[in-house]
Image (cartoon, rainbow, N blue to C red):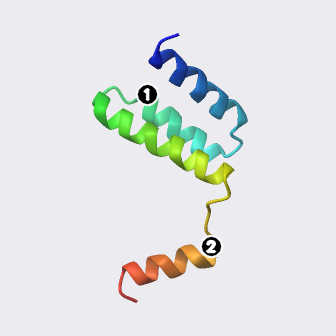
Amino acid sequence: MGRATEIRHELIEFIQRESDTSILKAIRTLLSKKSLDSSMKEKLTQRAMKSENDIKAGRVFTQGEAIKRTDLSLGK
């Protein structure tokens, strides 16, 4: 099985398990945009897969932590 086929199967599994409509809409938009070049699609796909793995591994922030990190990065 080629690398593209492996990735395709992995994405299908992620999509089948995903229940967040906004994530599914983002994936649909990403995959339906013919104007995006292939390197941009690859980067965005890799980020999505990394995020999925982070969530599964419990590497997430609470809302308060996310706000604090954002405030710090903005110099607040």
Q: Residues within 10 Å of mark 2 (few under 14, many from 20)?
A: few
User: What residue sits 52% from the left and 33% below the top?
Assistant: 28
For this view, does 75 lie left or right of residue 60?
A: left
Q: Secondary structure at mark 2?
A: helix
Name the one closer to the observer, 60 or 66: 60
- Location of residue 46 with respect to 3 vertically, above or below: below
Name the one closer to the observer, 39 or 22: 39
Residue 42 visible somewhere in the drawing: yes
User: What residue sits 31% from the left and 37% below the top?
Assistant: 40
Could you tell me how far apart the alpha carbons at marks 1 and 2 are, in whole angstroms?
31 Å
Where does the C terminus fall, quadrant-wise?
bottom left
| Foreground: disc 1 or disc 2 | 2
Image coordinates of residue 31 in percent, x first then y, are 45, 29
Q: Secondary structure at mark 1?
A: helix
* N-terminal label among 1 and 2: 1
User: Which mark is drawn over residue 63?
Assistant: 2
User: Which mark is drawn over residue 54?
Assistant: none
User: Which amino acid is tagged 1?
Assistant: Ser
User: What residue sits 61% from the left and 68% below the top?
Assistant: 61
Q: Residues within 10 Å of mark 1 (few under 14, many from 20)?
A: few
- Location of residue 68 with respect to 32 vertically, above or below: below
> Which residue extends farthest top?
1
Image coordinates of residue 67 in percent, x first then y, are 53, 78
User: Which amino acid is tagged 2?
Assistant: Gln
Image coordinates of residue 64 in percent, x first then y, are 61, 79
User: What residue sits 65% from the left and 71% below the top?
Assistant: 62
User: Which mark is drawn over residue 32?
Assistant: 1
